[in-house]
Image (cartoon, helix red, strand yellow):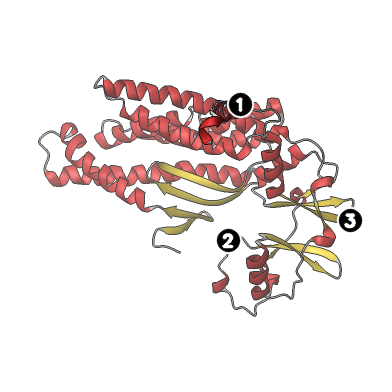
Amino acid sequence: MTPFTWQLAGFPVHIHQSWILAGALMMWGLSTQYFPQAYPGAAPWTLWTAGTTATILIFFSLLFHELAHALVTRWCGGSVGNITLHLLGGWTSLDQELTHPRHEIRVALAGPLCSLVLAAGFWGADTNPVAAYLTRINALVGGLNLLPLIPLDGGRLLRAIIWTRVTSYAQATLLTARWSQAVSLVFILYGITGFLTLQHTGWYLLGGLIVFVLASHTKRQVQHSHLLHGTVEPWMIPSSHVITLRPTDTIQTLHHVYVQYGYHWLLVCEENHIVGFVNAYPDFNFQSHPPEATIKHKMESLSPVLKVSPQMPLASAFDQCVMLNAPCLFVWEGDQWCGILTRATLNRLRTQAARPVTPTWNDWLFTHRWRRRVHGTDLRKLH
């Protein structure tokens, strides 16, 4: 636990150091630039009080925005990792994505609606300059987040709408990321043009760059998923080749297996029956537990959403891995456990499927240059 972490409504809340810097700069700007115009002739302590109050209320406005996302996620049956406030605003991290577009729409709308409700509440007291400023900020946060661009809430809303049409989460994510990249390039070009003509378009340039980078990262995560063909069965690791643990195994054993094989999720068996699995992600703090302690208290029940059939299409299995943020899926046929399908296998298959089967222009160009260099050489000069 860091000094900037606490619990709110059952959710871990992290305050990144960048938000501390942003809050300090905001407080200074409001106290020395904005409120002197709103309170002409006011004493310095009045201006700094107004700036400090506005900064604190902006902090809680952003926190309530993210808390709305988290509460609706919990209501829809999802799992929230943490809420983080940083330089660019806030972020609600999900342990796994929602499995239905209807839930995705509800969660995406929760934050902007919360901000707009706060804006309406402050608007009732807009005769006060602090309240008037908070009205504009919350309305701006709610409005900007509805832009249909990744990683904004509007981008999640657009993805959910596309998801209802294409029935593939990965394909909907890919289409939304491509759209976000295209729009961000327009923002970047507008920002560069304004910069060259001495206009104030720096925010367009910065926003476009942020959206382009994040949309590109999202696109890479799911790119080529539509090229996955076939079923799970030929690509799964048979159960006879999978390492399992027992409830009586120790934390030290789990640590050794994780270090040696790199497995994140390990099945726990008792008398040849699956009783759950243990999670050994890289952030698992092995040092905080006695080495002789058993893994029984770390064991989790095996959720049905982690189970797939051997006949499931690979594209659907990849969708499930992405939505659940799962390193592997467990393959079951009826009541019989058959093996596991790892996300690493699916990623390798995607990469393999995306390789061109015919030479590209780049290949032709280099081959042509090489042949010209060889055949154009006067061999008589070599003697």
Q: Is residue 309 in sight in this rendering?
A: no
State whether residue 353 is above or below residue 92.
above
Q: Residue at x 16, y 32 (%)?
A: 37
Residue ID for mark 1 = 364
Q: Amino acid at mark 1?
A: Trp
State whether residue 312 is above or below residue 361.
below
Q: Amino acid at mark 3?
A: Gln
- Between circles 3 and 2, the one closer to the viewer is 2
Q: Amino acid at mark 2?
A: Pro
Residue 165 image offset from top left, x and y in percent? 69, 25
Residue ID for mark 3 = 336
Q: Earlier in the sequence, mark 1 or mark 3?
A: 3
Q: Residue at x 68, y 37 (%)?
A: 100
Q: Is residue 124 left or right of residue 306?
A: left
Q: Earlier in the sequence, mark 3 or mark 2?
A: 2
- CA distance separating discs 1 and 3: 51 Å
- Mark 2 Cα-neighbour bin, 10 Å: few <14, some 14–19, many ≥20: few
- CA distance separating discs 1 and 2: 43 Å
Residue ID for mark 2 = 282
- Mark 1 Cα-neighbour bin, 10 Å: few <14, some 14–19, many ≥20: few
The answer to which of 302 and 188 lies nearer the viewer is 188
The answer to which of 33 and 125 lies nearer the viewer is 33
Could you say whether the residue bearing mark 1 is in a helix, strand or loop? helix
Q: Is residue 40 left or right of residue 277?
A: left
